[in-house]
Image (spheres, rainbow, N blue to C red):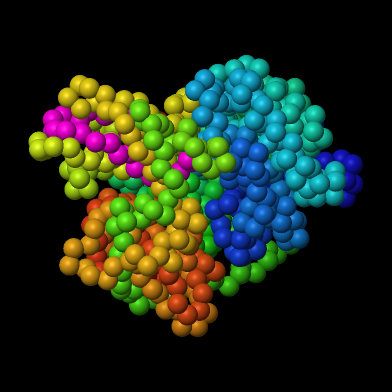
Amino acid sequence: MSRGDGLRANSSQFTLGGEPFRILGGSIHYFRVPRAYWEDRLLKMKACGLNTLTTYVPWNLHEPQRGTFNFQDQLDLTAYVTLAAQLGLWVILRPGPYICAEWDLGGLPSWLLQDKGMRLRTTYPGFVDAVNLYFDKLVAVIKPLMFREGGPVIAVQVENEYGSYAKDVKYMPLIQNLLQSRGIKELLLTSDNWEGLSYAAMEGVLKTINLQRLSFGAIQRLADMQPQKPLMVMEYWSGWFDVWGGRHHVFHSEDMLPVVSELLTRGVSINLYMFHGGTSFGFMNGAMDVDTYKPQVTSYDYDAPLSEAGDCTVKYRLLRNLLSQFHSEPLPVEPVPQERRAYEPAAIQQHLSLWDSLPFTDKPYRSERPVNMENLPGNGDSGQSHGYTLYETTITGGGTLNSRNNVRDRALVFVDRQRVGCLDVRTQELALPDGAGEVTLSLLVENCGRVNYGKALDEQRKGIVGDILLNHTPLTGFTIFCLDMKPGFVNSLMHSGQWKSDFKSPSIPGFFRARLYVDGPPRDTFLRLPGWGKGVVFVNGQNLGRHWCIGPQLFLYLPGPWLRSGENQIIVFEEQQVDDKIQFAENPDHGRTIDVYKLPFCTLL
């Protein structure tokens, strides 16, 4: 194949290397799959009959501190793309800078919000300067992977669904130029849903559409906008994501497969979003903010053809059978499933109160008025990105505490370290008990995840973002502790001598410790916490993500490669209630379900 002639969109059919080519794509995000399982997931993609891998690139992971970049280990994009090539897959990269993806702030670094005038996804100088520095680094990584350089990357997407945001007409041409001026010569694409499809086209950039229901009106609209151009559904949604307190979305095979079949029969190229969703490990989940704020769950199973743990589902096998009809050669053999184990319950052995953990945090910050997470010192002057922040001050009496909706997103409230209630978007007033003399008022504020889609991106500062009133008077004189629960903090806790073994009165919120003994090679499992309330789970220092008894997610996926033979350390940070053990299961419990196909599309967005 000629490497001088990449993916072209000069007629009603794509060509690659001068030969007719149809994109049969699927999305797998390297940052949502343990690196040890990249090959397994990509082999299953190849065996299903797909020929192209698509992936987003999350800026906030690759530049967690301003000017400090990470493309190593789990974030080794070069290794991931190279592996795809070795397995016979082409690649479409979607580098943003904004990616949506049900990912915190749509993949944008939270430190951008230190600038109070920041206008994300526009030509605002502070944003453009940051994108320029990031693209300097990113393009140096991805340029050798381009088709014309001998690599597998056949196309690059410019931004993501900008037609639905559309705050600056100069922005998209700017991003196009930032890519091309750095030497990206492969085909450029945009990706929009029906709402954003009418946004102004750019010369030399192919429009693609995102959808789930079969709408030939949408397909025809795309064709009319680009006569004699190939048609592509960049995101054919194979399922949907879940939010806390909602139901697990399912998209049945009998509804999905006929749509895929019809699109392929009509010659449309397609990318399944997601082919394999994986997991939003740690604190990286996004949130919705349409009518009200709704954070997304840790699992990104998405009801995709490959499950969160990499299982080939019924949907996978039906899709494989369909796609085999579009190949002249037999498909590769389906890889052997990963083994799983339901380990014996791990008993809680020790506990450590939140208050006793504070010496292991960075030096507290003192401020007359509250300071939002992003503008706290630390993290290389990039502020706090994720986790919890504790705000403490002294008061001399009770009364009405009013958050004025300045708590983002959820605050446990304590008087002299005794819990008195919770403040969030729905509950903005709380009665504090009267008492004699000075008492300490504490607010433990959780960042539950920044909104990843919509017009509210600029308002995603977390922690306490304005005044909190007690009896109509703003509180002052705060001591602020950063509890981002990074590996260094968790490691310090594990080696601390402060743990207690007396369970007569375990302090909540607090940290609870158990040991899981693995006999033989470690296997995947699902960690379950019946009888617990809300919090975060760490295994051998790895943050598995959030748990919350309101569901729908009632498990956390624990990959076998993160365990070791012998003893494993588990720490649960718990806010509400505890049980005396941690349980394990071979299969996940997604809780209550709802059929995506029976929902009005507007309720999904």
Q: In the rendered image, which quarter is residue 5 located in? A: top right
Give the answer, above or below, for where 152 lies relative to 378. below
Give the answer, above or below, for where 340 lies relative to 463. below
Residue nearest the viewer, comparing 232 with 397? 397
User: Could you say where residue 510 lies in the image, as x and y percent from the top left?
Assistant: 30, 57
Q: Quadrant of the C terminus?
A: top left
Q: Residue at x 22, y 48 (%)?
A: 417
Q: Which residues are magenta?
A: 384-407
Q: Residue at x 14, y 33 (%)?
A: 397
In the displayed structure image, the side of residue 472 where residue 243 appears, left or right = right
Magenta stretch contains residue 380: no
Q: Residue furthest front?
A: 437
Residue nearest the viewer, comparing 55 with 542? 542
Give the answer, above or below, for where 394 lies relative to 348. above
Q: In the rendered image, which quarter is residue 538 located in? A: bottom left
User: Could you say where residue 362 lies in the image, as x and y percent from the top left?
Assistant: 45, 48
Q: Residue furthest top?
A: 169
User: Could you say where residue 137 lies in the image, as x and y percent from the top left?
Assistant: 73, 40
User: Could you say where residue 573 lies in the image, as x and y percent from the top left?
Assistant: 34, 57
In the displayed structure image, the side of residue 138 where residue 222 appears, left or right = left
Residue nearest the viewer, comparing 278 with 367? 367
Q: In the rendered image, which quarter is residue 267 located in? A: top right
Q: Residue at x 57, y 41 (%)?
A: 380
Numbered-mark total: 0
Q: Is residue 323 visible?
A: no
Q: Is residue 523 visible?
A: yes
Q: Residue at x 20, y 45 (%)?
A: 416
